[in-house]
Image: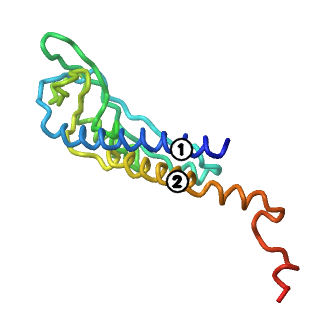
Amino acid sequence: MLLKAGFLFLCLIGLALTGFGVYFIGLGYAARDWPEVEGQVASTFVRTETASSAETRAQREASRRFYPEIRYGWSVAGERYSGSRYRLGTTHETYKTREEAQAAAAKYPSGSAIAVYYDPKDPSQAVLDRAVSAAVFVPLPLGILILAMGLLGYRFRAQLQAAAAEPSGGAATVEEQARP
């Protein structure tokens, strides 16, 4: 019963992630047509990120990336909004060196006017770049994979339970293999 519930749970997670993936891809393509409004850069600074799985100093150095964080504001129909999203699916472009990130950040000095593209259905959502990011496509195949795992597990749960119940875990013992 627990195995059945586990596989059904995987199916639900897979369905939810697949649905979100379809929505996110649609939103990514819709963003290409979002209207433009003039915004203003509130602040720009360079941040550093390092892979949390890096164990050695060399691994941390190799995984280190730099990115400009651009905070900006815009107004739509008299309402004021603020954000820092660069593109749907990613909040920033990453660079291998701090100098590259600083050069990118220099394009957005505090107080400067910038083009902000906002979602007409929800003006609080905006980007500085309307291009479709590769990250927009990640949830859909991940959701399909999890859904397939759940469906296959549910379909073959009886065989999985039987194999797990065998004393040798489903593998033939050396004596059984040696018998003619």
Say whether residue 63 is left or right of residue 111: right
Is 119 situated left or right of 58 in this image? left
Residue 79, above or below 86: above
> Which residue is the site of mark 2?
149
Kindly identify the residue that appears in the image at 28 percent across and 46 percent down: 133
User: Where in the figure is residue 111, as x and y percent of width and height?
Assistant: 21, 21
**Residue 85: % across, % down:** 30, 31
Helix, strand or loop status at disc 2: helix
Residue type marked 1 = Leu
Q: x, y percentage for residue 116?
A: 18, 29
On-image quarter of the N terminus: top right
Which residue is depicted at the point 28% across and 41% down?
A: 104
* In the displayed structure image, the side of residue 6 where residue 173 appears, left or right: right
What distance separates the C-alpha of mark 2 from that of mark 1?
Answer: 7 Å
Task: Name the image quarter holding residue 174.
Answer: bottom right
Q: Relative to the observer, which residue lies in front, 114 or 149?
A: 149
Going from N to C along the chain, the mark reached first, 2 or 1, is 1
State yes or no: discs 2 and 1 in contact (Cβ < 8 Å): yes
Task: Give the residue number, with chain letter if any, for mark 1.
Answer: 10
Residue farthest toward the bottom in the current orientation of the protein = 180
Q: Amino acid at mark 2?
A: Met
Q: Name, please, the residue furthest toward the right.
A: 175
- Mark 2 packing: few (<14 Cα in 10 Å), some, or many (20+)? some
- Asked which secondary structure carries label 1, the reply is helix
